[in-house]
Amino acid sequence: MKCDIEKIERYVDGELAEHEAQEVKAHLDECRACRESAAGLAGLDAKLGSIQFPKVSDERWRAVRAGITRARVVRRRIWWASMIAAAAALLITIAAYFFFSAEDGGGWTIERLDVNPGYSATLIENGKGTGYTAIVITPVENEF
Amino acid sequence: MENDELELVRRAAGGDERACTELFERYRDMIFRIAYARTSDEEEALDICQETFIRAFRSLRDFRGASSVKTWLVKIAMNISIDHLRRRMKSKTTELSEEIDPPAPGSVSDSIEAAELQTALWKAMEKLPDNERAVVVLHAIEHKKYREIAEILSCPIGTVMSRLHAARQKLLRYLEPFLGGAR
């Protein structure tokens, strides 16, 4: 094997196949310059591995975690708000369909019944007479 | 991927806060190290850390386990770091020589020599181009194999090797006084 610094790097990094590693090892036994290069690379990696990082306090980690949770909550709220808005839009569309497709021009009938003491039910029937579109039960004291 | 990790991801994807916390605590230090090594700024590194987990938790449902959670998170952190570095380049509010912010040596070592080495290591890292520094961080600090680094950085293995080689040649030169003359 000829002197090949890139192959020696792969050897130092443990990235060579077994037979290639054996070849490099044999070369290093014979070549002083490559042996020194390999030692230099290993020394550099050891120094880089010893690099120190700042110690982050628990309080700061808690703040980071809180920020992540906040983002999740906000996202969840946005999701629910979108779902509610979509459901409302769907209901309005259905109601509008019944209203405009009614044969008598959309004349709904509204009937109030006393269902229980203190409550009344408002029955909204579509113009086709095919059933009630909505039933709204309200406490009597809240009615105006 | 290990079963317990897969289960943890499944629970977190289902909205289990405890699983999210566990994922965060398991990987936060690693993400911080990567972010700090790329930015040399503690505040920015913590911001990157936060953004990484926010983005990861948002897309947990799409995580298919093709790579480990660790590799997936590192990839996200690397992309966010790039965004931060680009923003920093645009704003250019700090001089390059002032960007080096090595951790206070006194807090990590009593020896002056060791403290000098730490300062020299960070200065040398700071001098590397961003793409070479990314490879060094993943290889020498996070002990990733070439294949994993290529996957994280979305580049061929040959590119990983050539960047690592170029970075090492520079680092050997910058750190010569600390390496006992061995090259």
Image (cartoon, rainbow, N blue to C red):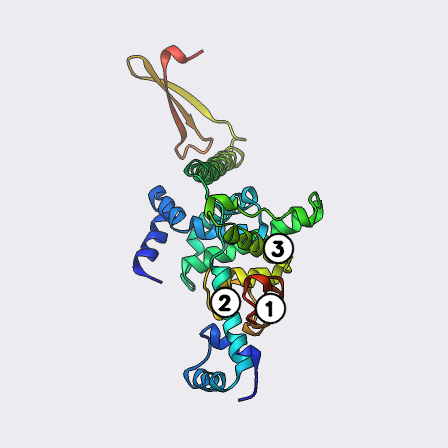
Disc 1 is placed on an element classified as: helix
Disc 3 is placed on an element classified as: helix
User: Nearer the N terminus, badge 3 or badge 1?
Assistant: 3
3 and 1 marks on the same chain: yes
Q: Is residue B83 above or below residue B159?
A: above
Along the viewing direction, whichever of B51 and B37 lies nearer the viewer? B37
The x, y position of residue A79, in whole percent, is 47, 40
Residue at the spot 56% in from the left edge and 48% down from the top edge: B102
The x, y position of residue B51, in whole percent, is 52, 46
Q: Is residue A80 left or right of residue B5?
A: right
Question: Tag on residue A43?
Answer: 2
> What amino acid is at disc 3?
Glu
Q: What residue is disc 1 on?
A: B163
**Nearer the camera: disc 3 or disc 1:** 3
- Look at the image and tell me whether residue A9 can be seen: no
Disc 2 is placed on an element classified as: helix
Q: How far apart are the two marked residues, 1 and 2, measured between alpha carbons?
A: 19 Å
Label 3 lies in what chain? B
> What amino acid is at disc 2?
Gly
> What amino acid is at disc 1?
Arg
- Look at the image and tell me whether residue A6 can be seen: yes
